[in-house]
Amino acid sequence: MAQLRWQKSSYSEGGADTCVEIAAPTTSRPHLRESATPETVIATTPAALRAFLGGVKGGTLGRAPGRTG
């Protein structure tokens, strides 16, 4: 795997290893990892990442489609 440049969320806790990091190379798929276990890396598609982030922002993760509350 080519060297990836990882970026932490602005919501992460300073120097703590308690966040998800992303690397988005221009010639490849976005990669995600948990900062506490940086050796475990997943690759995804831009569309799947957008859907995931939309669910996080909207608070809809873990709910059946079409359900609210």
Image (spheres, rainbow, N blue to C red):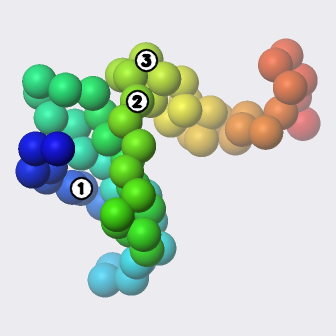
> Of the numbered discs in the image, which one, if any, rests on residue 44?
2
For marks 3 and 1 on the same chain, the one whose residue lies earlier in the sequence: 1
Locate the C terminus by quadrant: top right
Q: Position of residue 42 (x, y in %)?
A: 41, 43
Q: At 81% from the left edge and 19% from the top edge, which residue is drawn?
A: 65
Quarter of the image where one finds residue 8? bottom left
Q: Is residue 58 left or right of residue 69?
A: left
- The secondary element bearing badge 2 is classed as loop
Q: Is residue 56 above or below residue 6?
A: above
> Of the numbered discs in the image, which one, if any, rests on residue 17?
none
- The secondary element bearing badge 1 is classed as strand
Nearest the camera: 61 or 35?
Answer: 35
- State how far apart marks 3 and 1 are (Cα): 19 Å
> Of the numbered discs in the image, which one, if any, rests on residue 47?
3
Quarter of the image where one finds residue 64? top right
For marks 1 and 2 on the same chain, the one whose residue lies earlier in the sequence: 1
Q: Is residue 25 left or right of residue 57?
A: left
Q: At 37% from the left edge and 51% from the top edge, which residue is drawn?
A: 41
Q: At 42% from the left edge and 69% from the top edge, which residue is drawn?
A: 37
- Give the crowd class for mark 1: few <14, some 14-19, many >=20 residues within 10 Å: few
Q: At 17% from the left edge and 44% from the top edge, which residue is drawn?
A: 1
- Give the crowd class for mark 2: few <14, some 14-19, many >=20 residues within 10 Å: few
- The secondary element bearing badge 3 is classed as helix
- Which residue in the protein does label 1 denote? 7
